[in-house]
Amino acid sequence: MNMGNKRIKIFGYWVLFLVVSTMVFAQNGDIDFSSAGSIDDAIQNGKITLDQAIMSEKATNMVKSQLLSNEYRTVVSVDTNGKIENINNGVISTVLIKNFNLNEYKNFNGQVKINNDGSITITSNQAATENKVVNLEQNNFVLVKGSSATIKGNDEIGLLPSSEIEYKGTFIKNNGDEKLDIILGKPKVGGKYISFSDNTREINVNSDNAEVRISKQSQHDIINRISGNNIDIRNGGMAFEFNDGKFEQKADFLQTDRNMVINDIPNQDGYFVASPAINTKNMIMSFAPDANQLNKFNPLNDNRVYFTNVQIRLPDDTIVDGTMTELATRFHSTAAGAARDLYQNEMEKVKNLDMPKSEKDSWIDSLNFMASQVSPQIIGLDGGKRNIGYSTIFTTDSGLVLIVPAEGEVLSKGRKLIPEGQKSFAIPSGLAKFLNKESTEEMIRIKAKRK
Amino acid sequence: MKKRGQLSIFLLFALVFIIAAGILIFFKNENLEKTNMVLSEPNFEPYFFFLENCLKDKAKDSVKEVMLNGGYLKAPEPYVQIIFFSYPFYLVEGKNYLPPRETISSELEKAYNEVSVQCYDDLLYAKNNTMEIKLGKIDSEALITKNSVILRINYPVTIGTENKKESRESYRFEVPAEVDYVYSAIEEFINDEEETPDALCWSCLSDISKKYDLKIDMQVFDEKTVLFSFFQNKTDFPITWMFANEYG
């Protein structure tokens, strides 16, 4: 019995020891959840993991912020009422964000903030050495240094004032005083926003005080102004602005990085900006009062080299009858050949003119140079069928190719086709402008007649 | 006695026949002489007809050329030279150089005076060796109306031979060119542009294109210069009006 009582007594002391030890442990702060340092020590000693500490109800958001900042060696903060729903090896989720990988922000020269509503704001310091790639589940964007963006979901972000992001080669800057919503890859939204539509290559601008900058790498080149003022559009050295009901191009007039379409939806205007073959500093555009003129477009006797109008844009499912390779072949055999013929005809005209030899030589030299530029190639061929509409643009060595469906080619399904062998489906910019320009021909005619 | 009477009647018929034949031959010869006389005299009408048509063509050419040169026969300073064409600036450093309608009328007159000389040259080429053609002082007058340009020209041409001379000098042609209409469109555009000389207003061009039913082209020539073409091609006499603006 004595032996049994002794064992019970020892067990009782041991239990008492454990209870006291636990109490002492807690009181002494071995893991003091009000102290980031204490938790950090516990983490170092393997008593608890960071993920467990972050998920602990005991730790305050301030403590969690300190822990995360220490771990990722950047400023990470959790707002007063912000909540991390889950964290697994640094991949966190909130009510709005499924997977946000903090590991990608180690040594980030900036801040990551988990907001009360579950959104996450990333701020890149101006002193950062490079722009920050922000990986989302479906869409990625680049946060330009010195900028702040709030991720609201996998395809929706809020761009803070004076901030700039890049999405698939296009830069968006918020020049206003309020947050600007950016929708990635989703065309339909409400409120003030800028949205990207990957399928149609469009950017819809429905906000004041925004800047859209197209680069050579841009995968979007059709800009639709839904509404808004103080909207800047930049493309290479070119700068445009919607302001006070006007759409203006700012001097100096410099080279574009790529061809683009600008649609002014409220005013039902469409503009095309292109760099022609001869002088890449040149920019050509036309205004035609009658949108139906497009149907009569003929590159061989019409000097318009582009046209777009929101009223007559085809549905997105417009099909071109042929693969890109076929289109390229047809282009080489039709439009390019026609363009070369035009040069030859023009040269013959000039040769017959009675004018000083130096002038004639200069003119012929110009024509020879232009003729040498006729080697268009449609780039980005993938051999497969693609959906294209009026707005589709192909860049060629010598400028722009605009695909224009032929008049009346409407099939029973309501789709317009560019038929095989259609001669007027494409034209490089610059060529017609220089060669078919009504005024130039008229001038030559008059000068010739006078002699 | 009866036989003698028959002979007399026969002779009388013969006499009447001879007299009638004589009269016929007389008048026939007279007509022939008259015809020969007319053919030998020079007829200048085809030459004047040729001249009038030529002047009519040149009236049209004058209007087209002045429009292509921005309202001038030869663009004055400031202008931009593109290959061998010169185009006047209508806007430089915010200053409006759009020529008034009176200047354009005056330039049309100059152009007509100059290009119409070609008609005299052509006339000289067409004349025969017995003819002499002289041209006096050319003087024209242009009037820009709402829907046309009226060109009056004093073009004193005398055509003559040793025996005959004929002179004509006044002609009037109406060219159905809507110069005044296109001018109004350009004037509206330049007034818009004067407000913001550092920027080119695309929507203004678009609005004007729609308002006036004109096709407008623009082409950037260099970092500050833009060349504009206003096409009016809705009438039987299309015109293209070209000019340049400098921005920045």
Image: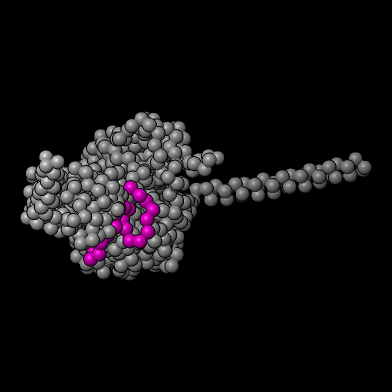
Which residue, as the protein is rendered here, is positioned at the far right?
B2
How many numbered marks have been drawn onto this rendered protein structure?
A: 0
Query: In front: A80, or A314?
Result: A80
Inspect this view and state whether residue A162 appears: yes
Query: In front: A169, or A325?
Result: A169
Query: In front: A103, or A292?
Result: A103
Read off the magenta span.
A174-195
- What colouring does the structure picture have? one colour
Q: Quadrant of the N terminus of chain A?
A: top left
Q: Kindly identify the residue that appears in the image at 33 percent across and 66 percent down.
A: A245
Measuring from the top left, give residue B174's x and y in whole percent.
Answer: 45, 62
Inspect this view and state whether residue A279 appears: no
Does A394 lie within the magenta span?
no
Measuring from the top left, give residue A12's x and y in whole percent.
Answer: 13, 47
* Quarter assignment of residue A157: bottom left
Q: Kindly identify the residue that appears in the image at 26 percent across and 42 percent down.
A: A277
| Vertical order, B130 against A117 (above or below) | above
Q: Is A350 left, or right, of A413 in this rendering?
A: left
* Quarter assignment of residue B151: bottom left
Query: In front: A141, or B18?
Result: A141
Q: Could you tell me what secondary structure mostly forms the magenta stretch?
A: loop
Q: Is B65 left, or right, of A142 in this rendering?
A: right
Does A188 lie within the magenta span?
yes
Measuring from the top left, give residue A371's x and y in whole percent.
Answer: 28, 36
Q: Kindly identify the residue that appears in the image at 21 percent across and 44 percent down.
A: A88
Q: Is A155 left, or right, of A49 in this rendering?
A: right
| Vertical order, B130 against A345 (above or below) | below
Q: Kindly identify the residue that appears in the image at 53 percent across and 40 percent down.
A: A413
Measuring from the top left, give residue A49's x and y in whole percent.
Answer: 15, 45
